[in-house]
Structures are given as structure tokens and as C-alpha cells.
Image (cartoon, helix red, strand yellow):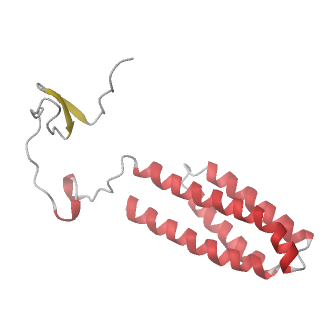
Amino acid sequence: MTGPEPRPDTQPGPGGEAGPGGEPGPGGEAGPGAEQRPERPGGAGPGGVRRSGLRNPDKAVRGLGAGTLSLEALVLLLAIQPIRVVGGDLGGAAVGAIVALAVACVVLAGMMRRGWAWHAGTVVQGLLLLSGLLHWSLLVLGVIFALVWAYAWHVRRVILG
């Protein structure tokens, strides 16, 4: 077994491996390119562009969208029985709508790499709100998940710009 592999954003120095940005490594000496860079206001990176601090912001945002849709699918499927028991009239159309929406959420969660998947997720939230016409509890779930989805959009906009 060999030692840990250097990260791609590190530069080795003469005294050992340098940390990110040429910081001193175990040998105590800074690697090449270790000159101090002036701090830009607000943590802005090169060119004044604000960085999120994430290694892969696109992947993080896709994970947020996929996680949100997966959680929504799980909650929808688990809500069928309590709605039937407590809420009363949950007909076949309402159960079918819940299952169809849960399947759509799972499919979209797997397709978050596509640019249109975020817009399709918004359509799913609208359909869930519309399914509130079949049962009032679906409207409540629709409002909750529409708010969660709106927050996910906000986080996406903040991270990706």
C-alpha cells in the first residue's frame, strides 16, 4: 500500500508536499507558487468571481435537487396509508396520482444532470399542488414541497450564480 495520493490542486515543494495553493507541507517549506495572494472582498476568486468554496458546485447542486426529489417520492409513497386511514376518502385516482408523482420524482432525481430536469421538477410541484383537488392532504404536501423546491432553486442560484 502506498501513501496518500496528492490532491490535484497541490504543488509539491522541496521540503515535502505543499498544501493547497502552495502552503507549507510536512517539511515546513512552501512549494513553488506559494506567494501570498491578496484577499478580494467577499471571498471572491480570480477575476472577482465569487467562489462557493465547494470542490464541484455543479455536482453539489445536482445532489441537492436529487435528494429533494427522492425525499418527496418517499414521503408521497409513505403518506398513502395514513391519508387513507385518517383522512377518509382517498380514491383510486388519488392513489394513482400519488404513485405517478412519486415515480416522476424518482426518474427526475436520476436525471438531474440534464438542464431541463430542474424545470420538470417545478412542474411536478405544480402537479402535486393540483392533485390537492383530489384530496386536501395532497394540497398540504404540495405546499410543503413547493416551498422546499423553491428553497432548492434559491440555493442553486446562489451557488451557481
Query: Foreground residue, 77 or 111?
Result: 77
Query: Foreground residue, 161 or 64?
Result: 64
Query: Foreground residue, 104 or 54?
Result: 54
Relative to 158, say whether 32 is above or below.
above
Q: In the image, residue 8 lies at what x, y percent?
A: 30, 33
Quadrant of res 77: bottom right
The quadrant the N terminus occupies is top left
The residue shown at (20%, 52%) is 46
Is residue 116 at least partly visible in the picture? no
Quadrant of res 16: top left
Q: In the image, residue 9 lies at what x, y percent?
A: 27, 37
Q: In the image, residue 66 lies at what x, y percent?
A: 58, 54
The residue shown at (39%, 60%) is 159
The residue shown at (68%, 58%) is 105
Is residue 111 at least partly visible in the picture? yes
Residue 73 falls left or right of residue 156: right
Quadrant of res 82: bottom right
Relative to 10, say whether 107 is above or below.
below
Residue 100 falls left or right of residue 123: right
Q: Residue furthest top?
A: 1
Q: In the image, residue 95 lies at what x, y percent?
A: 85, 67
The quadrant the C terminus occupies is bottom left
Query: Foreground residue, 35 or 104?
Result: 35
The residue shown at (10%, 35%) is 30
Relative to 110, say whether 83 is above or below.
below
